[in-house]
Amino acid sequence: MTDKTGTEEFNADELEAPAWLNAQFIGDVLSSYEKCPELRVTALQITPASAQGDHYASVMFRTTAEYTTSKGKFSKPLIIKTMPEQEGHKKDMLAESHLFSTEIGAYTKALPEFERILREAGDDTKLYVPCIYHSLEPRQVMIFEDLVPQGYSVIRNRPIKEEELKKVFSKLAKWHAASMKVMNEQPELMEDFKYGLVEMPALMSDPMVTGGMASFVKMLDKIPELTKYKPFFEKIREDYLQRMADVLQEYRKNYQSDGYYVMCHGDFHLRNMMFKDNGDVMFVDFQVCNLCPITIDLIYSVYMLMEAEQRLDLGKDLINYYFSVLEDTLKKLDYQAEMPTQSGLWKQIHRHKYYDIFLISTFLPMMLPIKANKVKMNDIILDPITRDKCYTFDFYVDEIKRLLPKYEELGYFKDL
């Protein structure tokens, strides 16, 4: 059964579980996972797994399965992740994507190997929660152990703390370091990770993405102290999306001999990680993991993860901390290729400025109002009036007033 209390907090397509998600299906999954043919599910309560704004590229349910075996009665909290079945924008946008095959590959091939390499070096960092079932046919489904009963939660109604951010960047650095070693020594293991956000044509052609710059320029034109920047953005209006795509696809289409490349998370924002009181953080949602410049997760984190105070210097302190952990981990892993340098990392971050420009003009104006509980994600995606409204909030305009002078100081506008 599905709990419908407080339905306004959840995504509409997660209020009612599909017919196939029943006791028989979960029983078969658990029977196989626990190697227990006699296992029988006796009770199953299904609820939405996440709040509005937490995700869009899947449909997620939470359940606690009560079951019996020859050894007694048991229960197991689970998260079920599947593709949308209701007709509409969400289903259309995701229909031809590689999201589930990518995430299954991350859980079954890449992340286990990264952990194995770290263990060999004496590092017991846990990179992912166990996936107990996955399939692509007859439907795309993944089932995980539920982290909430283990004490993990998503940060929603408060700013993320500095010490929590350091935990995040430490774990990201270890993941990136392990991926660099695998890419250098076992490149065949990583061949399938080639589908990021840019490889989702329906997303890249959606008005939510294509209309961002027009709304951004309109906002600049209304704020006296920002109008001087309008010509720079008007100049790149026709091709900035392609230049942003070039950054994301650099590894596959324009490999640079001095570039640093890793397997990135690809959607590294606050709602894609869960925190525990002991300080641990667990990353989730690996649907757009792909091989790309090391800068992708870092630049994305500046706008989609950090708070305004960390953005004042474009995340310099946290990114430098990340690099110190990356360098230390690569040494522990006996990385045999040329070691990255901190100056080289910042050179690439500045070279990839079109990713910054895309994020401040398109994703940041959506993320900030969602975090502030001013608008809902579905409204932003489906309603152009709501999207335009996002550019008018004072907290967003104030951010732009601080960020654009920083871009100017770094020379971002000189050769646009």
Image: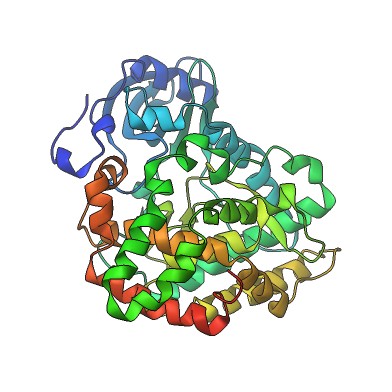
When asked about the image quadrant of residue 343, the answer is: bottom right
Residue 82 visible in this rendered orientation of the protein: no
Q: In the image, what residue occupies the spot 41% across and 40% down?
A: 206
Residue 49, how many percent across, how many down?
Answer: 31, 39
Q: In the image, what residue occupies the spot 53% across and 21% down?
A: 32
Name the image quarter holding the C terminus: bottom right
Q: In the image, what residue occupies the spot 63% across and 56% down?
A: 247
Residue sitting at the far bottom: 409
Reply above or below: 165 against 274.
below
Residue 217, how many percent across, how many down?
Answer: 37, 63
- Nearer the observer, 355 or 42: 355
Residue 100, how many percent across, how many down?
Answer: 53, 33
Name the image quarter holding the N terminus: top left
Residue 231 visible in this rendered orientation of the protein: yes
In the displayed structure, does residue 99 sit left or right of residue 65? right
- Nearer the observer, 394 or 333: 394
Reply above or below: 194 against 123.
above
**What coloring was used for the rendering?**
rainbow
Residue 103, how many percent across, how many down?
Answer: 56, 38
- Nearer the observer, 182 or 226: 226
Reply above or below: 34 against 335.
above
Q: In the image, what residue occupies the spot 24% across and 26% down?
A: 16
In the displayed structure, does residue 173 sit left or right of residue 261? left
In the displayed structure, does residue 282 sit left or right of residue 293? left
